[in-house]
Amino acid sequence: MASTLQKHDEKRPEGRFEDPFEALASMRRMMMRTFFDPGFIPNLIEGGTPAVNLYEKDGTYTLECALPGYKKDDITVEASADAVTISGSYADEKTEEKQNYHRREVKHGSFSRTVGLPHEIDPNQVAASFENGMLKLTLHPTKAVERKKIPISA
């Protein structure tokens, strides 16, 4: 019996699991880390896109964007009639190359996120503030233009 297992192991490709349930357990651990590890924040790691909230109150839209660790000077905001683009860059402090990291999740790189708006806005009336890592934009929609029936000439 032992010789049969040895022959089986010799033919097994490198990195493959002998027990299929071991493979499932490993995959389960990876999935749990991805979805439930509070240190795993994919939207802020190495150029990912930051999280946003967009809501309407009293006829004005508010867009909030979470940018922890960023400074006001790291961020750029551009607005058009139907979208807002938030971009920025973040650089690590100098680190020694000799360090042996076991985990490195401090963000660095750049990001850009364009958020489509549910109604056209006036880009000249956008107000922006940045406090405690939260960018807040106030967007004023333009007046809705009613449809007009156009007569067709002969």
Image (spheres, helix red, strand yellow):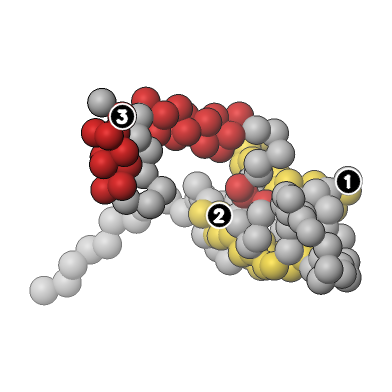
Of badges 1 and 3, nearer the viewer stands 3
> How far, Cα to Cα, is label 2 from label 1?
22 Å
The number of numbered badges drawn on the structure is: 3
- Residue that badge 2 annotates: 115
User: Does 21 sit left or right of 73 as displayed?
Assistant: left
Which quadrant of the structure image shows residue 35?
top right
- Reading the chain from its start, which is encountered first: label 2 or label 3? 3
Give the Cα distance between marks 2 and 3. 62 Å
Disc nearer the start of the sequence (2/1)? 2
* Quadrant in the rendering for residue 20: top left
Task: Say above or below: 80 vs 8.
Answer: below
Mark 1: which amino acid?
Asn
Q: Is residue 6 above or below residue 103?
A: above
For marks 1 and 3 on the same chain, the one whose residue lies earlier in the sequence: 3
Give the percent coordinates (x, y) of residue 13.
32, 51
Secondary structure under badge 3? helix
